[in-house]
C-alpha cells in the first residue's frame, strides 16, 4: 500500500520541529475517554502507523483514561524516535462520572507533570499545555499562579516549552507576559470560529494554533454548505474540514484523532486536498 504524504509541511514550536499534520491520542481510550480501549492491539497499531507515516507531533494527556493513552504511547513507541515530539496537557482531572474538574492548584499541577513523565517514560516533557476554563469552554480569570508553577517546573528541567489551552485572548496575552508561549490549543473548526482574530494575531507572532475538535467534536460537523462542497469535490465533509483548517493559516497544526489506521490514512489524504477559491468562499460563509 502506498503511503500518503503528509500535508502542510512543518512548524517550529520553540526549538521543536513538528509536522503540521499531527495525531491526537484522545480517542484511544475507552468510551468518553475513560478506561482502556476495546481493541488494545488496534490502538497500538495506529500509534505505530502514525510514526511510520512521518507524523512527529503527538498530542495526549495523562487525564485521558486516565493514564491510558500515555501508557499506550509508551508501549507502542518507547524508546521514542528523536524526531518525535509528544505534547501533553495539565490543569484538569477526571472524576468517577467522567467529568473534567479543574486541577490548577500548584500541588495538582506538579503531580500531573510528574505523572505524565512517569506514564510516558520521559525525563523531560517537550511541551505542556495549561488547560484553562471548563467543559463549557474558556472562562475569564488570571493564569498567573498556575503558569508560574509550570515555569518553576520548566526551570527544573522537567518541561521544555509551554502553551495554553481552552484560553481566552486575554489569558493568552497575560500568559505571554509571564513566559514565552509556543502554542495555543482551543476549540476551532469551520462552524466555531470565535478565535479567527486570535489565530491571525498568533500567526504574526510566530505562535502555533492547535484546534481541538477540528471535525466538530464527538459528532461530525453538520452544514449544507460543507456537504455541497464535499459533493462537488467528490470527497467527504471531514476531508474538506481538515483541508480548510490547513489552508486557513500557516500556524494551524492539526491533531485529528482516530483509533483506526484506515481512518488515519483517510484523514491525511483528505487534509491534502487543495481547496479552490470557490470552495473557500462557500466554506467561509459557514462560521460567519
Image (tube, rainbow, N blue to C red):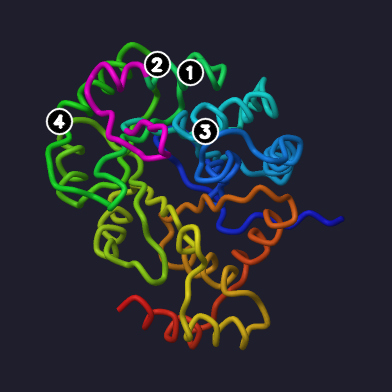
Residue placed most toward the observer, 32 or 170? 32
x, y percent for residue 140 = 14, 47
Q: Are marks 2 and 1 in contact (CB under 8 Å)?
A: yes
Question: Taking 158 as reference, is 56 above or below it?
Answer: below
Magenta residues (range): 92-111
Question: Taking 56 as reference, is 243 above or below it?
Answer: below
Side (left or right) of 52 relative to 205 = right
Tag 3 or tag 2, which sits nearer the N-term?
3
Tag 2 or tag 4, which sits nearer the N-term?
4
- Tell me the SS state at disc 2: loop
**Cα distance between the residues tagged 4 and 3:** 28 Å
Give the foreground label among 2 and 3: 3
Question: Taking 278 as reference, is 188 above or below it?
Answer: above
Residue placed most toward the observer, 156 or 26? 26
Q: Residues within 10 Å of mark 4 (few under 14, many from 20)?
A: few
The residue at which mark 1 appears reads as 117
> Looking at the rendering, which quadrant does residue 216 occupy?
bottom left
The residue at which mark 3 appears reads as 65
The residue at which mark 4 appears reads as 144
Give the foreground label among 2 and 1: 1
Question: Taking 272 as reference, is 104 above or below it?
Answer: above
Amino acid at each position: 500500500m502506498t503511503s500518503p504524504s503528509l500535508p502542510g509541511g512543518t512548524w517550529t514550536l520553540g526549538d521543536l520541529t513538528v509536522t503540521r499534520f499531527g495525531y491526537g491520542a484522545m480517542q484511544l481510550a475507552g468510551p468518553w475517554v475513560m478506561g482502556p480501549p476495546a481493541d488494545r492491539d488496534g490502538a497500538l497499531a495506529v500509534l505505530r502507523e502514525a510514526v511510520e507515516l512521518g507524523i512527529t507531533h503527538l498530542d495526549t494527556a495523562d487525564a485521558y483514561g486516565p493514564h491510558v493513552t500515555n501508557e499506550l504511547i509508551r508501549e507502542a513507541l518507547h524508546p521514542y524516535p528523536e524526531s518525535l515530539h509528544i505534547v501533553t496537557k495539565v490543569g484538569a482531572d477526571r472524576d468517577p462520572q467522567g467529568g473534567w474538574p479543574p486541577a490548577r492548584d500548584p500541588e495538582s499541577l506538579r503531580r500531573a507533570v510528574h505523572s505524565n513523565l512517569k506514564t510516558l517514560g520521559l525525563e523531560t516533557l517537550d511541551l505542556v499545555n495549561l488547560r484553562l476554563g471548563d467543559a463549557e469552554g474558556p472562562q475569564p480569570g488570571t493564569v498567573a499562579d498556575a503558569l508560574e508553577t509550570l515555569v518553576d517546573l520548566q526551570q527544573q528541567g522537567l518541561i521544555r516549552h509551554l502553551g495554553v489551552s481552552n484560553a481566552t485572548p486575554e489569558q493568552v496575552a497575560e500568559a505571554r507576559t509571564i513566559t514565552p508561549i509556543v502554542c495555543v490549543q482551543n476549540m476551532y473548526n469551520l462552524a466555531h470560529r470565535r478565535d479567527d482574530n486570535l489565530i491571525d494575531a498568533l500567526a504574526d507572532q510566530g505562535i502555533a494554533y492547535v484546534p481541538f475538535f477540528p471535525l466538530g467534536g464527538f459528532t461530525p460537523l453538520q452544514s449544507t454548505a460543507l456537504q455541497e462542497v464535499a459533493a462537488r469535490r467528490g470527497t467527504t465533509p471531514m476531508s474538506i474540514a481538515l483541508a480548510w483548517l490547513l489552508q486557513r493559516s500557516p500556524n494551524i497544526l492539526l491533531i485529528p484523532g482516530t483509533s483506526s489506521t484506515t481512518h488515519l490514512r483517510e484523514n491525511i489524504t483528505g487534509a491534502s486536498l487543495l481547496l479552490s477559491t470557490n470552495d473557500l468562499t462557500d466554506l467561509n460563509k459557514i462560521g460567519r
